[in-house]
């Protein structure tokens, strides 16, 4: 944490400005040119006269993932020589794009040297951080928000705003089905049963286990599906249980939660005879099932349905000691030994504190504690998550403005580039493999080295060829795909502006959280590859409209 609470923002300081331009920023980002970075920082200093600009340094053509850059080294030298006690950059990504390493400077190196750090566009000023409330925890795998914001701004200027109504997330009023009186091949919604199904999904989203849900339904004296069916046959009007009958079981709850029927998907042909001569029915492989999406009115929207599937999977991997209603239950792992973190409590004075701790350490299996206070961890995750949500929402908004046809064209274009890159890579490997033989002839390598390297490059070529096939397949699929309905993208906007972490959003957006011994965290977000892919597409679009 920043530990310089005694430094007032008005304290005079000796500042050094640092600028960075790298090839991976592309020429499209002229707002990131060294000149523009310089202009911005000089303007900032004009408004902060108590800060004296002592020196400036820049790196041109160095990537943000590597800290061994001459300009940055001279910043560290100036700090060590005591010439400067403040570092100013335009935004965090100028310092570096690799969050763990960047975090090391932000949280450890700069504070320990008493250096104030300012990233203007990200509104970071270490002198303002006086308590643990406003934490910056280095987070890996998070996308650079301001980078995305700028990209988006640029694109938005180019397009007329014609936001699609995006009505996908319409609320469905009812759940549960019965056969249509007019056409018995058609499913229509049964209001009463639908209400029950909806309640079950909602309880699951809140974190209840299938056992809890079954108990709740029985407490409410609601008829189990079997009893309800009977009651319907008898034209019995009530869905409530009157006397001792078969009750809700956890399995009955699970069957409902796992049934895609509620999302409007009809799956048929799960069983059948393997051969026309055989009479016996057998279970068929899932790939042989006949699935019709959007077959009938859905009672649970697809996002909720998919979300619940994720929660069910997560339940099977959670540790026994964890409370399913807690947002991070079953999601937090030790970054070093990979075991789940357990939640423990400790009482100090009259207050009880909760914290996570490595289960390997707890069981004496040779790991360190990795302890992390629950509230702080949840805040850090929420902080990271809100960044990710902003990025996704921004991307979604820009995609909507671009329009479906354009997006598909961009996707294909993007794939063409990836295919070309893969080809170049493969050519390189083939070339190298050929030269190995020459190297052997010239006695540069011996036979053993030759064999090892040849095997290695042969494998790389095989893998590359396989990847190329995949890319080409994706390209032809992309050409057919006429819809830009990325349902996963819409998940993000659901949780925009959330002020506390909840289990539903964690299930929707986070795969795993890893905690390191030194309190760094790393988050594997869901859809991170998809987001990165879209960001690349937008980047290309931005270059196109220059
Ligand atoms: Zn561990």
Image (cartoon, grey):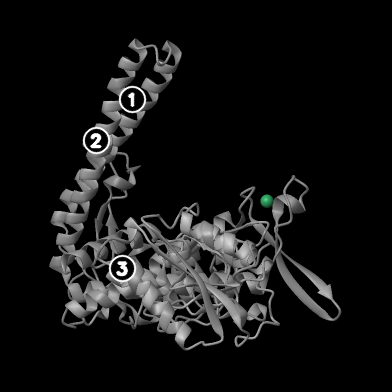
Respond yes or no on whether mark 3 lies under 8 Å from ligand 1.
no
Q: Of marks 3 and 1, which one's residue comes earlier in the chain?
A: 1
* 493 displayed left or right of 479: right
Residue 523 visible to an observer of this rendering: no
Quarter of the figure with the C terminus: bottom left
Q: Position of residue 57 (x, y in %)?
A: 46, 64
Callout 3 environment at 10 Å: few (<14), some (14 to 19), or many (20+)? few
The local crowd at label 1, few if under 14, some if 14 to 19, many if 20 or more residues have their Cα within 10 Å, is some
For marks 2 and 3 on the same chain, the one whose residue lies earlier in the sequence: 2
> Badge 1 is on which residue?
458
| Residue designated by label 2 | 275
Up/down of 78 relative to 279, above or below: below
Q: Which mark is residue 290?
A: none
Q: Give the number of the mark in front: 2 or 3.
A: 3
Q: Is residue 254 left or right of residue 395?
A: right
Question: Residue 35 is drawn in which quadrant?
Answer: bottom left
Q: Nearer the viewer, residue 28 or 183?
A: 28
Residue 399 x %, y %: 24, 71
Give the Cα separation between the discs numbered 3 and 1. 40 Å
Seen in the image, is 177 located left or right of residue 2? left
User: What element does badge 3 sit on?
Assistant: helix
Residue named by callout 3? 487
Q: Secondary structure at mark 2?
A: loop
Residue 151 seen in this snapshot: yes
Quarter of the figure with residue 410: bottom left
- Residue 132 appears in which quarter of the rendering? bottom right
Tell me: 234 left or right of 216: left
Q: Residue at x 16, y 82 (%)?
A: 160
Q: Nearer the viewer, mark 1 or mark 2?
A: 1
Q: Nearer the viewer, residue 397 or 80?
A: 80
């Amino acid at each position: 944490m920043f530990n310089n609470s005694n430094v007032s923002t008005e304290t005079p300081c000796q500042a050094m400005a640092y600028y960075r331009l790298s090839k991976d920023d592309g020429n499209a980002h002229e707002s990131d040119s060294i000149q523009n970075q310089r202009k911005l920082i000089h303007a900032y200093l004009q408004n902060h006269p108590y800060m004296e600009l002592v020196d400036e340094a820049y790196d041109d053509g160095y990537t943000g993932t590597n800290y061994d850059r001459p300009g940055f080294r001279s910043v560290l030298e100036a700090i060590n020589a005591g010439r400067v006690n403040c570092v100013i950059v335009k935004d965090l990504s100028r310092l570096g794009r690799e969050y763990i390493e960047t975090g090391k400077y932000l949280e450890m190196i700069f504070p320990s040297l008493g250096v104030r750090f300012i990233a203007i566009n990200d509104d970071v000023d270490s002198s303002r951080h006086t308590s643990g409330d406003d934490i910056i925890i280095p987070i890996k795998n998070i996308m650079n928000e301001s980078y995305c914001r700028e990209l988006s701004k640029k694109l938005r200027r180019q397009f007329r705003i014609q936001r699609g109504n995006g009505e996908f997330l319409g609320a469905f009023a009812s759940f549960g089905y019965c056969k249509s009186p007019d056409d018995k091949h058609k499913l229509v919604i049964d209001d009463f049963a639908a209400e029950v199904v909806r309640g079950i999904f909602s309880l699951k989203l809140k974190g209840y286990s299938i056992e809890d849900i079954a108990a709740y339904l029985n407490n409410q004296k609601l008829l189990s599906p079997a009893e309800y069916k009977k009651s319907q046959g008898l034209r019995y009007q009530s869905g409530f249980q009157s006397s001792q009958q078969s009750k809700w079981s956890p399995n009955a709850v699970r069957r409902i939660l796992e049934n895609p029927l509620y999302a409007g998907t009809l799956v048929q042909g799960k069983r059948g005879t393997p051969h026309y001569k055989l009479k016996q029915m057998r279970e068929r492989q899932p790939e042989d099932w006949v699935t019709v999406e959007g077959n009938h009115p859905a009672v649970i929207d697809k996002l909720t349905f998919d979300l619940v599937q994720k929660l069910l999977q997560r339940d099977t991997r959670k540790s026994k000691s964890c409370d399913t209603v807690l947002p991070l239950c079953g999601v937090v792992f030790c970054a070093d030994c990979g075991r789940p973190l357990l939640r423990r409590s400790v009482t100090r004075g009259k207050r009880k504190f909760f914290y996570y701790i490595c289960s390997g350490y707890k069981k004496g299996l040779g790991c360190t504690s990795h302890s992390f206070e629950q509230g702080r961890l949840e805040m850090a995750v929420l902080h990271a998550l809100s960044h990710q949500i902003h990025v996704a929402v921004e991307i979604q908004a820009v995609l909507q403005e671009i329009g479906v046809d354009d997006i598909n064209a961009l996707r294909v274009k993007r794939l063409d580039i990836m295919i070309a890159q893969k080809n170049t890579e493969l050519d390189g490997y083939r070339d190298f493999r050929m030269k190995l033989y020459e190297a052997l002839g010239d006695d540069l390598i011996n036979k053993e080295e030759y064999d090892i390297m040849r095997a290695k490059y042969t494998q790389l070529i095989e893998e590359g060829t396989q990847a190329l096939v995949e890319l080409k397949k994706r390209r032809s699929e992309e050409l057919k795909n006429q819809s830009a309905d990325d349902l996963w993208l819409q998940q993000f906007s659901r949780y925009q502006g959330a002020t506390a972490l909840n289990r539903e959003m964690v299930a929707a957006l986070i795969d795993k959280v890893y905690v390191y011994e030194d309190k760094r965290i790393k988050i594997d977000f869901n859809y991170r590859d998809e987001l990165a892919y879209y960001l690349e597409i937008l980047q290309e679009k931005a270059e196109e409209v220059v």
